Structures are given as C-alpha cells and as structure tokens.
Amino acid sequence: MALMMLSSVLGWLLAAVAADASLGTVSALRTANFVTGGTLHVVALGIFVLLASRIPGFGKRIRVFAYVAAVPALVSVVSLVWFNGSVFILLGRLLCMIWIVVAAVSVSRRLSRDAQA
C-alpha cells in the first residue's frame, strides 16, 4: 500500500511540475511513478502471496495457486528492461488479488465449518 501511495504522490508531483521542469526531471518522476506503482507494488504483492500461503491451515490447492499467482508478479521485474514485459504487471496483480479473495473465502468457510461442529 505504501508503494501505491508513493506512486500517487509522484503522479501528483509530476502533474504539478511537468510544465516547468526539465525533460530529465519529468522523465525521472515518470519512471519512479511507473516503478513504484507498477513493478515494485506487484513484486511486493507476489511476495506477500507466497509468504501468506505458508500460513498453516491453507490446503495444497491454495498453496499451488499462490505459486501460479506469484510467478508472473515476480517476473514483472522484466518490465524494467523490456516494455512488453509490462503484461506481467497486469497478470501478476490480477492473479494475486484473485488469490487473496480465494484464500479469504477458504478461511471463512473453514471457520464456518468449525463453528458448526
């Protein structure tokens, strides 16, 4: 979340100074905005999913899905050197968010079953 907030601040700063700043400053702010809000955020999300999947109580399917979600998120680092690699940012973010919802539903169902027993 901190990376998204930083990206937002950089975006607002870029909008505020773009007309008067040098081309180098605008380019640096734009790159920092992309890296913090895109690549670094998705990599952090992928690491979170991998670490969260190790919590006891998740089944094998949830752990396997965590790897399926985290791999594109971690591979999104490629987007820093290859523009077409930015597709991994979108894919990694989407899969990690789906994993979080699936994991939450799994925990909720387990708690519901435990409460009924």
Image: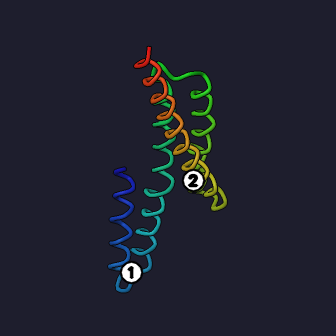
Residue identified by numbered label 2: 89
Q: Nearer the viewer, residue 84 or 89?
A: 89
Q: In the rendered image, which quarter contains the C terminus?
A: top left
Q: Is residue 32 left or right of residue 94?
A: left
Q: Position of residue 90 (x, y in %)?
A: 58, 55
**Can you name the residue that lies furthest to the front here?**
116
Mark 1–mark 2 Cα distance, whole angstroms, equals 26 Å
Residue identified by numbered label 1: 18
Q: Is residue 61 left or right of residue 10?
A: right
Residue drawn at (63%, 62%), measured in percent from left and top? 83
Q: Position of residue 103 (x, y in %)?
A: 50, 33
Residue drawn at (34%, 72%), measured in percent from left and top? 12
**Can you name the residue that lies furthest to the top here?**
117
Q: For residue 81, which quarter of the picture?
A: bottom right
Label 1: which secondary element? loop
Residue drawn at (61%, 33%), measured in percent from left and top? 65
**Can you name the residue that lies furthest to the bottom here?**
19
Amino acid type for the residue under numbered disc 1: Ala
Q: Nearer the viewer, mark 1 or mark 2?
A: 2
Mark 1 is surrounded, within 10 Å at the Cα level, by few (under 14), some (14 to 19) or many (20 or more) other residues, namely some
Q: Nearer the viewer, residue 25 or 105?
A: 105
So how many labels did they put on this image? 2
Q: Nearer the viewer, residue 95 or 26?
A: 95
Residue drawn at (60%, 22%), measured in percent from left and top? 60
Q: Position of residue 102 (x, y in %)?
A: 54, 36
Q: Earlier in the sequence, mark 1 or mark 2?
A: 1
Label 2: which secondary element? helix
Q: Nearer the viewer, residue 111 or 89?
A: 111
